[in-house]
Structure formats: structure tokens, C-alpha cells
Amino acid sequence: MGKIGHPRQVKLFASIIFHREADLEAVLRLLGDTVGPVEEKTPPVLFTQTTYYDREMGEGLLRCFVLFAPLVDREILPDIKISTNATEDLFAKEGKRTVNIDSGYIALEHVILATTKGYAHRVYLGKGIHADLTLMFYSGSYRALEWTYPDYAAEQTIVLFNRWREVCKESLRTCGPTDPNA
């Protein structure tokens, strides 16, 4: 029989898709207050991977990724998703979002996105939130799976998450327990 243990802590991240008129700095300040201090943010770039959000949010959307500083326990993910959904609501105008925040975590073995939508590869966590296994780490890199969203499967996104994995690994080395095989 295996012994029950506590998994290594993880780093939270968010993908923020936003309309040019949205106040990104205000969103980041609120996320800093509710999720934790921002450790790193990518520059905003045009979000061209899909038109899914255009109807609600308008055209010409931008996106940035944000890495949060603290290491956290994985069990916090449903609360983080609920919090980021509330942040989206705060910045909505006339009932339409101006910002979409996909929250998740980076673990040494995988990248998980939080979602309110269930599916075969999504595990229910509680509080109406599912975990989407988005990327798996093997053979020295995160790898996309057959269901990974194309923008998360893109080479530049995988390069970013591989770099952030190293940030997570270093944080675990200096702040908490680590796995010598990681």
C-alpha cells in the first residue's frame, strides 16, 4: 500500500485576454491582491488564435501571460478560478467581459488549466471547477496532448512554460521540498 503524501507546491499563472480599452494594470493589481504578487508578465501581443471571444469582447484582442510569485498548494486552484471569474465580472461592461482570465498552475510534471466546463480529460476538483491537463512534461520538455488548445501547443508558449518550469523548480529548491528526479 502506498503512503499518503502531500504533492510538491506549484506556481500559479494566468493567461489574460483583454480588449484594448480594458485597464490591464488595474486587473493586474487586483490579481496581485487576490492571487499573489506578479513575478513575471509577458508583453501583450495580438491574440489571433481564435475569434471565439470577438463576439463578446470585440476584435483586436490582446493577450499576456502572468506568473505569480508564491508557491502554493494545488488544492487552491478552484478558489483561484472562482476569484479570477469574479475579477472578469468586475471589469465587464454592459454585461460583456472586457477581460478573460484563464488561471492554472505549473507543476514540474504538467501544466493544469482551471475550467468550469467538464469533458473526458478534465477532472472535477469541486466548487464547480475542473482541472484540464493541458501540457505534460516528458523527454525534457512540456508536450501538448491531443486536446491541448492550439495556442498552448504553440512552440513559443511551450518555450515560455519550460522557462517558468525552471523558475518553479528553483523556487522549490530554495523554499520547499523537491524531488531529486525532477
Image: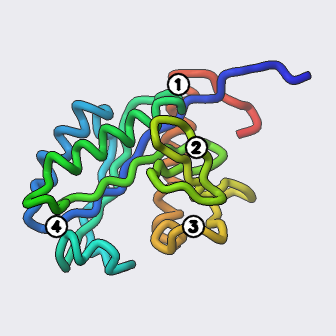
| Residue topped by disc 2 | 124
Quadrant where the N terminus lies?
Answer: top right
Specify the amino acid type for callout 4: His
Asked which secondary structure carries label 1, the reply is helix
In x, y percent, where is residue 146?
66, 71
Q: Secondary structure at mark 3?
A: loop
Tell me if mark 2 has few (under 14), some (14-19) or many (20+) residues whose alpha carbon lies within 10 angstroms of its own.
some
Q: Dot 1 corresponds to which residue?
A: 174
Do tag 1 and tag 3 residues touch (Cβ < 8 Å)? no
- Precedes in sequence: disc 1 or disc 2: 2
Up/down of 105 relative to 179, above or below? below
Mark 1 or mark 3: which is in front?
3
Spatial CA span between label 2 and label 3 = 18 Å
**Is 155 situated left or right of 140 in this image?**
left
Q: Is residue 45 above or below residue 101?
A: below
Element under label 2?
strand
Q: Which residue is mark 4?
A: 19
Which residue is painted at 48% across and 56% down in the image? 117
